[in-house]
Image (spheres, rainbow, N blue to C red):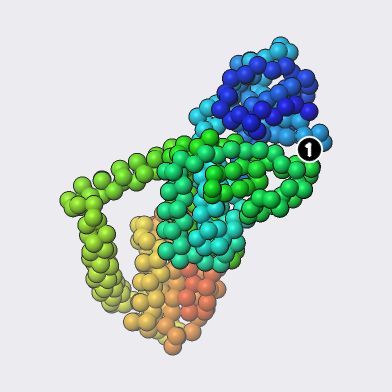
């Protein structure tokens, strides 16, 4: 089993080692070193990447059978004694996020008595799941303020292994169920003791900033999305760019954005209401014109058949229903295009099954659709105006 140097030193990124085993993992070459600073994926924290003798390390994991650290490569390494290098930007990012998680979890435990039961370190944001049904705004703000105060205090962060028999001597929030006789503690001075095998910064100030971005309920618990350090800075920069652009577009100060946007929302709501009213009036006028040109059917009632060169499907269906109600009609409307749309309707006082008529039409073009005796619609086929007119002329009324 190789020595895991990252437990005691998370800052070394270049080191030399000896390959003590060669193997394959999913057809990719892999090696085990006599000692490694590469962090393997575990505990919610992703693995490190980097190179071994210039060959990319694409995955690092702990082999369950003997706890060896396996480095999966994208090519062969020929030498036995190798020089390795860890991607520091990725390592530091993970250290900032993971240490920030410890601080934030401890803050929620203190402020809201909410224990962390899950942690995910994603490529963009991190989340913790809290064993609590709900958090109010004061608790969220309080936890964020406490977490950032701990960051600004620059409290020392250390780690050590202790016998499991000594666990009762430390104020752990949660005791993990892991094999072995020892437990690794990560200690944030005068604030938090947590059992953890991850990589962490030496002082809390290196976390830089902890920013809560979203809080939501998930399966009866609370999920908190957050970003730390460089991620939080980039997130702030992106949002600042958006806010400045909005303020420029609306020619107002940043502080006035909520008021101005709400005003625009109300104006849009009123405009949409008026537009819908005008649209309904125009549709009613169009329905009246169609009824004026209706043909009388031998079975009684009027028949309206009309084909359009492309028309909104919802509008076509609405028009069919309006004509049927207004003119005591059977209505067959179509809109050419790819896909084409067909809408059929009849007044309730008339006889006939619109769904049956629709199926007669669709059977000729392999279309899809359905409805009821009084209204049916479909499409899913390509047709020109002339082709739709031919389809409608073949309908048996």
Residue lying at 57% horizontally and 23% vertically, measured from the top left: 13
Location of residue 368 by image quarter = bottom right
**Residue 155 coordinates in the image, percent (x, y):** 49, 41
User: Which image quarter holds the N terminus?
Assistant: top right
Residue 276 vs 38, above or below: the answer is: below
Report whether 358 appears left or right of 163.
left
**Residue 173 coordinates in the image, percent (x, y):** 63, 54
**Residue 9 coordinates in the image, percent (x, y):** 61, 29
Location of residue 69 by image quarter = top right
Indicate the secondary structure of the residue bearing disc 1: loop
Task: Tell me if mark 1 has few (under 14), some (14-19) or many (20+) residues whose alpha carbon lies within 10 angstroms of its own.
Answer: few
Report whether 286 appears left or right of 344.
left
Report whether 41 appears left or right of 232.
right
**Residue 200 coordinates in the image, percent (x, y):** 56, 37
Which residue corresponds to mark 1? 64
Residue at the extreme right of the image, as rendered? 65
Residue 121 vs 57, above or below: the answer is: below
Residue 197 vs 344, above or below: the answer is: above
Residue at the extreme front of the image, as rendered? 169
Residue lying at 18% horizontally and 53% vertically, measured from the top left: 252
From the viewer's side, name the closer residue of 364 and 34.
Answer: 34
From this viewpoint, is residue 127 visible?
A: no
From the viewer's side, name the closer residue of 325 and 63.
Answer: 63
From the viewer's side, name the closer residue of 375 and 20.
Answer: 20
Residue lying at 52% horizontally and 79% vertically, measured from the top left: 373
Residue lying at 49% horizontally and 65% vertically, measured from the top left: 135
Residue at the extreme bottom of the image, as rendered? 349
Q: How many marks?
A: 1
From this viewpoint, is residue 17 visible?
A: yes
Residue 251 vs 320, above or below: the answer is: above
């Amino acid at each position: 089993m190789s020595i895991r140097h990252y437990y005691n030193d998370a800052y070394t990124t270049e080191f030399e080692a000896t390959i003590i085993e060669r193997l394959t993992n999913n057809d990719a070459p892999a090696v085990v070193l006599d000692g490694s600073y590469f962090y393997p994926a575990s505990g919610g924290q992703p693995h490190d990447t980097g190179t071994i003798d210039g060959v990319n390390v694409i995955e690092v994991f702990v082999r369950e059978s003997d706890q060896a650290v396996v480095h999966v490569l994208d090519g062969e390494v020929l030498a036995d004694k190798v020089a390795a290098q860890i991607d520091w930007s990725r390592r530091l990012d993970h250290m900032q996020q993971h240490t920030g998680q410890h601080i934030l979890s401890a803050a929620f435990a203190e402020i809201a008595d909410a224990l962390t039961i899950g942690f995910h370190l994603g490529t963009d944001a991190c989340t913790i799941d809290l064993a609590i049904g709900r958090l109010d705004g004061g608790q969220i703000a309080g936890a964020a303020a406490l977490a950032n105060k701990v960051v600004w205090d620059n409290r020392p962060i250390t780690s050590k292994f202790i016998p499991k028999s000594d666990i009762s001597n430390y104020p752990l929030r949660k005791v993990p169920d892991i094999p072995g006789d020892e437990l690794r503690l990560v200690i944030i001075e005068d604030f938090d003791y947590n059992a953890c095998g991850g990589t962490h910064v030496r002082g809390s100030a290196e976390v830089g900033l902890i920013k809560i971005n979203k809080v939501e309920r998930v399966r009866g618990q609370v999920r908190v999305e957050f970003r730390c350090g460089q991620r939080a800075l980039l997130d702030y920069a992106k949002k600042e760019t958006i806010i400045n652009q909005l303020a420029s577009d609306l020619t107002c100060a940043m502080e006035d954005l909520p008021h101005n946007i709400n005003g625009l929302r109300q104006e849009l709501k009123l405009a949409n209401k008026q537009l819908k009213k005008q649209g309904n009036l125009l549709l009613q006028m169009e329905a009246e014109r169609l009824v004026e040109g209706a043909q009388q059917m031998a079975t009684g009632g009027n028949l309206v058949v009309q084909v359009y060169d492309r028309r909104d499907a919802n509008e076509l269906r609405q028009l069919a229903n309006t004509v049927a109600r207004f003119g005591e009609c059977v209505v067959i409307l179509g809109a050419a295009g790819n896909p084409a749309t067909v809408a059929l309707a009849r007044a309730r006082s008339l006889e006939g099954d619109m769904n049956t008529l629709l199926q007669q039409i669709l059977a000729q073009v392999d279309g899809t659709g359905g409805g009821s005796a009084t209204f049916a619609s479909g499409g899913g086929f390509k047709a020109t105006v002339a082709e739709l007119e031919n389809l409608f002329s073949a309908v048996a009324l």
